[in-house]
Image (cartoon, rainbow, N blue to C red):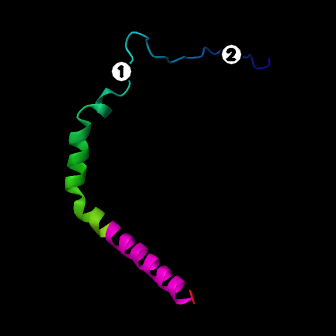
Amino acid sequence: MGKQPVRMKAVVYSLSPFQQKVMPGLWKDFTGKIHHKVSENWLSAALLFTPLVATYAYVQNFQEKEKMEHRY
């Protein structure tokens, strides 16, 4: 005898229209969470952004000097 196909039932997940609280904890105390993350990691952020800002300022200054040098 050969193989007989087995009928499978699909499972469908959906949200109830009466209760759609998908991510309520994401927005609860949002400013407090952001303040907590910034106050914990301010040193790491400063160490990351200081070289980037300094490099950008240097490049802008160098380009401005080059433009003024070739002006006449």
Q: Is residue 40 above or below residue 61?
A: above
In the image: residue 29, left or right of residue 11: left
Give the magenta-colored segment's residue range.
Answer: 49-70
Residue 49, above or below 14: below
Q: Amino acid at mark 2?
A: Val
Look at mark 1 in the image and give the residue it sits on: 21
Answer with left or right where residue 19 lies relative to residue 43.
right
Separation of residues labelled 2 and 1 (CA atoms):
37 Å
Q: Which residue, as the protein is rendered here, is positioned at the far top?
A: 18
Where's the N terminus, which quadrant?
top right
Q: Where is the C terminus found, in terms of image quarters? A: bottom right
**Residue 34 x %, y %:** 26, 45
- The residue located at (30%, 32%) in the rendering is 27
Spot occupied by residue 65 in the image (x, y as percentages of width and height): 47, 85
Pointers 2 and 1 in contact (C-beta within 8 Å): no
53 or 2: which is nearer to us? 53
Q: Residue at x 20, y 55 (%)?
A: 40
Q: Which mark is residue 6?
A: 2
**Secondary element type, mark 1:** loop
Relative side of 65 to 28, left or right = right
